[in-house]
Amino acid sequence: MSRLIHRVKSRCASRSLLQAQWFSHVNGVHASPQMRAWLTDSMSLTKKLIARCERFRVQRLAQQHALVLADEFAEVALPRRTQVQEREVLLRCDEKAIVYAHTIVPLSATASDWPFFGRLGERSLGTTLFGDPRVVRGELQYARLHAQHPLVLRAAAALGVVLHGPLFARRCLYKRGNGLLLVTEVFLPEIKNIRQSQRN
């Protein structure tokens, strides 16, 4: 009986690492004042990073059909885990990886919903979203992602390092026409070393 209880607890623990607990208020993640400022800022993250480095670039890691994550499908109104369009990038300041960004779009979305999504290449999605008056931005959600969360593991694989969680993350749902798009931004350890004051 004790072995059965142990197995059940182990499975529950594994599931909790794969599915983050998302909060509607930043207080839920107990961030430092510096990190809180990054998480809650409503301006484009791309613009904020550009102001804090000499050279900003988007490194595209993947753009493909993939299975939606366990803690994502409900956010984009999917009834179960299924295939979505997925985009993964690193946002780099002076070649240092600062943010890992993960975007999903349900396959039901049409080209007229998100006409630019398939043609972004290494351009910033954030700049496009903030510059389109038809895009409606939802409320930010916040989480601390454990080291075994899929997004942390993917970021670690892209960087060729081991990332020791938890890492702070935020996500936001966007709507354009009938299309939904979910952007998750995971702040990498190098965020602590980025210049905090904007250029004059």
Image: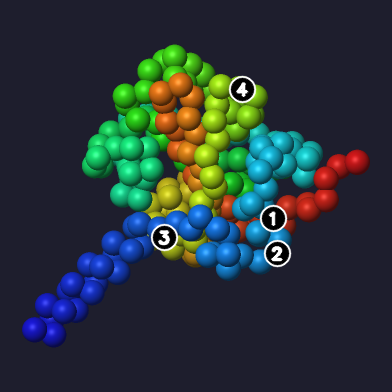
Check disc 4: other Cα within 10 Å, few if <14, some if 14-19, many if 20+: few
Q: Find disc 4 in the rendering and name its residue.
A: 133
Check disc 4 and give the amino acid type.
Pro
Q: Earlier in the sequence, mark 3 or mark 4?
A: 3
Q: Earlier in the sequence, mark 3 or mark 1?
A: 3
> Toward the viewer: 188 or 47?
47
Relative to 55, residue 26 above or below: below
Of the two numbered discs 3 and 4 in the rendering, the one whose residue sits closer to the viewer: 4
Q: CA distance from mark 3 to mark 1?
A: 20 Å
Q: Position of residue 160 (x, y in %)?
A: 49, 51
Q: Secondary structure at mark 4?
A: loop
Check disc 1: other Cα within 10 Å, few if <14, some if 14-19, many if 20+: few
Point out which mark residue 33 bears.
2
Give the residue displayed 30% in from the left and 69% down from the top: 13
Relative to 20, residue 5 above or below: below
Check disc 2: other Cα within 10 Å, few if <14, some if 14-19, many if 20+: few
Q: Secondary structure at mark 2?
A: helix
Q: CA distance from mark 2 to mark 1?
A: 6 Å
Q: Find disc 1 in the rendering and name its residue.
A: 37
Q: Position of residue 26 (x, y in %)?
A: 58, 59
Residue 90 visible: yes
Give the residue displayed 42% in from the left and 53% down from the top: 153
Give the residue displayed 71% in from the left and 61% down from the top: 34
